[in-house]
Image: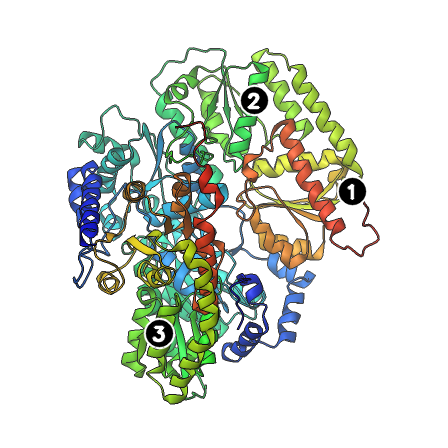
């Protein structure tokens, strides 16, 4: 066994050498720090992270606007989110993330809309504050059921010296609703990650600090933090928490509302799924309101059961018994799912490259199906993510931080995994190479993948990706 | 318990199950959701004339605009040249968006690089990003050409591509004679079609300036920003082949967005060769299939002494007739019998189906040339375009659309809406209903909100597969669009199985 691992390590080290060779010297030196082979027992993955991407290499990362508008704020359904600046950013992020929300589109649910101040040259030259003022009035006239507005800054806002905070304060008074100015210009920081942080800070400053909720808290109140309800993930998570006896008072931010956010300082425990994007606000609520938080993982039955017990450990026996009841209740179904799919998937090798959570969080779900993750990395993870990753990955796993398209293509081409899980920009490259693929940001238009109900779909999807007959036809039969 | 290993429910069915219905109902208390009746009242009000008037008073706010920004177009244009890497100078998030936008439309890879400017570049300018970025792109992806455009960040701080690229060459990032055409593509001016035009002009001027023109017999054909470029460029090549015309396509992204799944990823494929691009200066004429969307490039070609022929998305009979006759006039080549036969077949198809089309009211939205082409086609089908929305309209569009509608009895009831968006169109469709809607996938929200069935023709098409593989230009393209419209009409007729009109024969 160890000989096999040694071979894998040697091959992976060689692959890293091969890609670095192609870079100019300066870039090779920089990239070398982001690539590594995981050594068992090490407290982290041995890579640098959250560092500026190198120009011209085809990073897969996005920007701070994507982190705030796309991730943190965009899913909040009772607020109208202005993409403040030129038309593009809002256009490209219009309805593409699959953060589901109930309600009537354009009436009391504003998630799948592209609302923009559509900057023209004169707005750049003379500033956009007056336009923003008017935009807010027009939104207020057209969407009476909106509970507020957020201003998602695009690059020019921070460069032309607009004072969106002043506009927000003035207009909030005028219209009597919450208005949140977010300085998430795309050039800030190195990835989506700073946009998460800025987005979190704005919740702190413009929502929680101003909230006056008369909400009556209960003994079993929890909030789901960092679940964006992709394909309905938050719903298939919430159902388990409710079944074990907890009362979910808020979802952050998938299918979420301003009103839920305002109630959250009264929760007994915050449940944090995506640590990367919402640890900031969780820490803040711990410091300011004394609400403890616990990270959990709802991918795959092993991690779900572990998480349910961990969550329950913060409550009394009613909840602890509730957790056991839920685990037992779903046992037969998950066993049947595993019995059906594990024989078709066991031993299959997976390479992942996702955002800030899933490169580690889904490992357990694959392992429940007998699959093995042989390479993983984050678009925008930080050091603490790579530390946490060390609890998930096996000795010899190839680690790649902020991977470039060139590197990932080379790694996949040489390793030839049975499945790659990454984003839409990668999907078609690998499918053409004959490598099965699933989008692991959007669940490839499927989902949910969270919770027991989601795991069944996850198992089915991985099976259909890998065992599709199409992979047998990649090469023409007359080609040797 | 909802799931069953033998029959696993997808999200659509899963969340219809009673336990999830009650979960969502229970959640409403924490949302402090408005009462159902109140939501319904407001929903109805958003479809009223009163709301329409408030909606049309908007001066600053855009809601669901049907346009994107310049560098998106620049990336598409650059992708259509041999071995070319689109390079966008500015923030990196933009490039992630452009790539995913094309991934979702074509269901294909899209290669483009950013030079990842951040705060320090905002202060000091992005020259170092270009010096380092060009060297890296060149080493990793070995393009034959790097075509540079800009994000709004680089434009706001006023980076000068020309001098930065020269500097990068001096510093040895790339060889002195290496091709790096460029275009400034500010996203706060125009739209994605403007960016395509600017990039095309940038590439042409890179190869044409300083070169002496020796007028020849070839013609240049520019497609402009075209979501159907895969199907359309192949159809164009077939038509030009049948006509025996010697031509150069000015940007041909048809192959790079339609590579095979044969075990190999092709970052580059097909495209207009660099040599042909240079020699295109000598062409007798430059045709544009989307004249409004390529206005600056055409103007540039004309300034070099070429004749220019601007068409507006030739969809259907008369549009294609005009294209072929102009081609014949300019090249002196006769229109072959085979194309005349195809024409006859399209006319035949229209005669077979016209009774289902006559007098049907349509609302449509899209890019300037696309809406002109589609409107012309609807008019020749005897359909009645009623609302035409073009968010990224130009003065020329408004004038041409006015003339087009005025010239046909079927266009009399139609109003053109330059600069309006899909939220305006929502009010139009709610207060002055039409039978069908034509536009991109984003029309599906209008379909849902107003109950108007959507025929998907436009960009982007995210929620249907492979449409871009079929041409919409030429007689064959007209046939494809005709069938799309007819299928929708018949599907709607058949959607009520208890209706009287459930005929076996139509």
| Mark 2 or 1, closer to the camera | 2
Quadrant location of the C terminus of chain A? top left
Residue A374's tag is none
Residue furthest out toward the right: B500
| Mark 1 or 3, closer to the camera | 3
Q: Residues within 10 Å of mark 2 (few under 14, many from 20)?
A: few
Nearest to the observer: residue A418 or residue B297: A418
Horizontal relation, residue A134 to residue B407: left or right: left
The first of marks 2 and 1 along the sequence is: 2
Q: Secondary structure at mark 1?
A: loop
Q: Are discs 2 and 1 located on one and the same chain?
A: yes
Residue B359's tag is 1
Q: Quadrant of residue B71?
A: top left
User: For mark 2, what is the residue?
Assistant: B238
Q: Secondary structure at mark 3?
A: helix
Query: Are the two marked residues, 3 and 2, in contact with CB atoms closer than 8 angstroms?
Result: no
Q: How many marks?
A: 3
User: For mark 3, what is the residue?
Assistant: A307
Horizontal relation, residue A326 to residue B242: left or right: left
Q: CA distance from mark 1 to mark 3?
A: 62 Å
Q: Residue at x 21, y 44 (%)?
A: A11
Q: Residue at x 26, y 62 (%)?
A: A389
Quadrant location of the N terminus of chain A? bottom left
Residue B187 coordinates in the image, percent (x, y): 42, 45
Nearest to the observer: residue B312 or residue B11: B11
Nearest to the observer: residue B410 or residue A446: A446
Nearest to the observer: residue B152 or residue B103: B103
Residue B374 shows in the view:
yes
Q: Residues within 10 Å of mark 1 (few under 14, many from 20)?
A: some
Residue A222 coordinates in the image, percent (x, y): 40, 80
């Amino acid at each position: 066994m160890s000989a096999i691992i040694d071979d894998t390590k040697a091959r992976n080290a060689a692959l890293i050498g091969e890609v670095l060779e192609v870079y100019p010297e300066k870039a090779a030196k920089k990239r070398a720090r982001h690539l590594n082979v995981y050594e068992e027992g090490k407290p982290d993955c041995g890579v640098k992270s959250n560092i500026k991407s190198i120009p011209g290499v085809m990073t897969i990362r996005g920007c701070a606007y994507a982190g705030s508008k796309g991730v943190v704020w965009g899913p909040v359904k009772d607020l109208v989110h202005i993409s403040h600046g030129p038309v593009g950013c809002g256009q490209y992020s219009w309805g593409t993330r699959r953060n589901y929300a109930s309600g009537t589109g354009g009436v009391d649910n504003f998630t799948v809309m592209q609302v923009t101040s559509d900057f023209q040259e004169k707005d750049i030259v003379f500033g956009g504050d007056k336009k923003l003022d008017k935009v807010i009035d027009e939104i207020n006239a057209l969407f009476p059921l909106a509970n507020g507005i957020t201003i998602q800054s695009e690059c020019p806002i921070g460069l032309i010296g607009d004072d969106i905070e002043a506009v927000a304060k003035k207009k909030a008074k005028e219209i009597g609703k919450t208005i949140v100015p977010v300085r998430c210009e795309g050039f800030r920081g190195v990835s989506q990650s700073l946009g998460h942080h800025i987005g979190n800070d704005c919740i702190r400053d413009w929502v929680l600090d101003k909230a006056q909720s008369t909400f009556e808290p209960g003994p079993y109140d929890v909030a789901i933090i960092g679940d964006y309800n992709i394909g309905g993930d938050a719903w298939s998570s919430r159902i388990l928490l409710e079944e074990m006896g907890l009362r979910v008072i808020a979802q952050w931010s998938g299918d979420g509302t301003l009103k839920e956010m305002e109630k959250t300082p009264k929760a007994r425990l915050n449940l944090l799924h995506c640590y990367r994007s919402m640890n900031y606000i969780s820490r803040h609520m711990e410091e300011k309101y004394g609400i403890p938080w616990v990270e959990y993982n709802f991918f795959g039955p092993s991690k779900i059961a572990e998480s349910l017990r961990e969550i329950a450990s913060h409550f009394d026996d009613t909840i602890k018994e509730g957790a056991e009841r839920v685990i037992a209740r779903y046992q037969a179904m998950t066993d049947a799912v595993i019995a059906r799919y594990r024989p078709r998937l066991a031993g299959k090798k997976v390479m992942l490259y996702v955002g800030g959570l899933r490169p580690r969080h889904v490992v357990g779900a694959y392992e429940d199906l007998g699959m093995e993750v042989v390479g993983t990395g984050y678009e925008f993870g930080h050091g603490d993510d790579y530390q946490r990753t060390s609890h998930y990955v096996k000795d010899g796993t190839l680690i790649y931080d902020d991977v470039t398209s060139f590197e990932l293509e080379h790694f996949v081409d040489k390793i030839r995994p049975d499945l790659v899980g990454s984003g839409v920009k990668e999907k078609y490259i690998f499918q053409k190479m004959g490598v099965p693929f699933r989008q692991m940001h959007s669940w490839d238009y499927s989902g949910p993948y969270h919770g027991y109900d989601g795991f069944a779909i996850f198992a089915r999807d991985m099976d259909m990706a890998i065992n599709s007959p199409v992979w047998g036809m990649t090469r023409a039969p007359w080609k040797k | 318990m909802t799931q069953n290993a033998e029959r696993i429910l997808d999200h659509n069915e899963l969340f219809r199950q009673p336990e999830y219905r009650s979960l969502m109902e229970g959640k409403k208390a924490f949302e402090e959701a408005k009462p159902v009746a109140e939501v319904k009242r407001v929903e109805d009000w958003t479809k009223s004339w009163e709301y329409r008037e408030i909606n049309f008073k908007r001066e600053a706010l855009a809601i669901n605009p049907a346009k994107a920004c310049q560098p998106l177009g620049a990336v598409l244009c650059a992708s259509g040249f041999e071995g070319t890497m689109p390079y966008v100078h500015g923030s990196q998030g933009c490039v992630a968006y452009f790539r995913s936008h094309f991934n979702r439309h074509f269901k294909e890879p899209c290669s483009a690089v950013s030079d990842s400017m951040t705060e320090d570049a905002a202060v000091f300018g992005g020259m170092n990003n270009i010096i380092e970025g060009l060297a890296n792109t060149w080493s990793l992806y070995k393009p034959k050409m790097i075509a540079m455009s800009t994000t709004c960040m680089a434009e706001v701080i006023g980076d000068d591509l020309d001098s930065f690229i020269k500097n990068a060459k001096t510093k040895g990032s790339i060889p002195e004679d290496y091709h790096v055409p460029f275009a400034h593509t500010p996203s706060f001016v125009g739209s994605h079609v403007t960016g395509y035009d600017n990039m095309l002009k940038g590439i042409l001027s890179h190869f044409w300036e300083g070169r002496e023109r020796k007028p020849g017999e070839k013609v240049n054909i520019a497609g402009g920003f075209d979501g159907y470029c895969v199907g359309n460029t192949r159809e164009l090549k077939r038509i030009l082949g049948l006509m025996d015309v010697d031509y150069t396509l000015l940007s041909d992204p048809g192959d790079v967005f339609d590579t095979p799944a044969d075990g190999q990823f092709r970052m580059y494929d097909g495209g207009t060769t660099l040599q042909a691009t240079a020699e295109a200066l000598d062409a007798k004429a430059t045709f544009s299939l989307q004249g409004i969307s390529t206005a600056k490039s055409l103007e540039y070609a004309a300034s070099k002494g070429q004749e220019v022929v601007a068409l507006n998305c030739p969809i259907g009979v008369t549009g294609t007739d005009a294209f072929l006759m102009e081609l014949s006039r300019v090249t002196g080549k006769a229109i072959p019998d085979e194309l005349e036969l195809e024409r006859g077949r399209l006319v035949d198809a229209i005669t077979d189906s016209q009774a289902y089309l006559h007098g049907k009211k349509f609302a449509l939205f899209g890019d300037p040339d696309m809406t002109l082409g589609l409107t012309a086609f609807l008019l020749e089908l005897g359909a009645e375009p009623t609302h035409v929305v073009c968010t990224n309209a130009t003065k020329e569009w408004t004038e041409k659309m006015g003339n087009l509608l005025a010239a046909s009895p079927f266009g009399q009831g139609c109003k053109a809406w330059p600069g309006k968006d899909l939220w305006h169109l929502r009010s139009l469709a709610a207060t002055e209903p039409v039978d069908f809607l034509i536009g991109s996938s984003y029309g599906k929200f209008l379909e849902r909100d107003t109950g108007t069935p959507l025929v998907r023709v436009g960009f982007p098409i995210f929620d249907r597969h492979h449409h871009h593989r079929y041409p919409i230009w030429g007689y064959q393209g007209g046939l494809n669009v005709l069938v799309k419209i007819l299928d929708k009409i018949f599907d709607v007729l058949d959607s009520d199985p208890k209706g009287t009109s459930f005929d076996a024969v139509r």
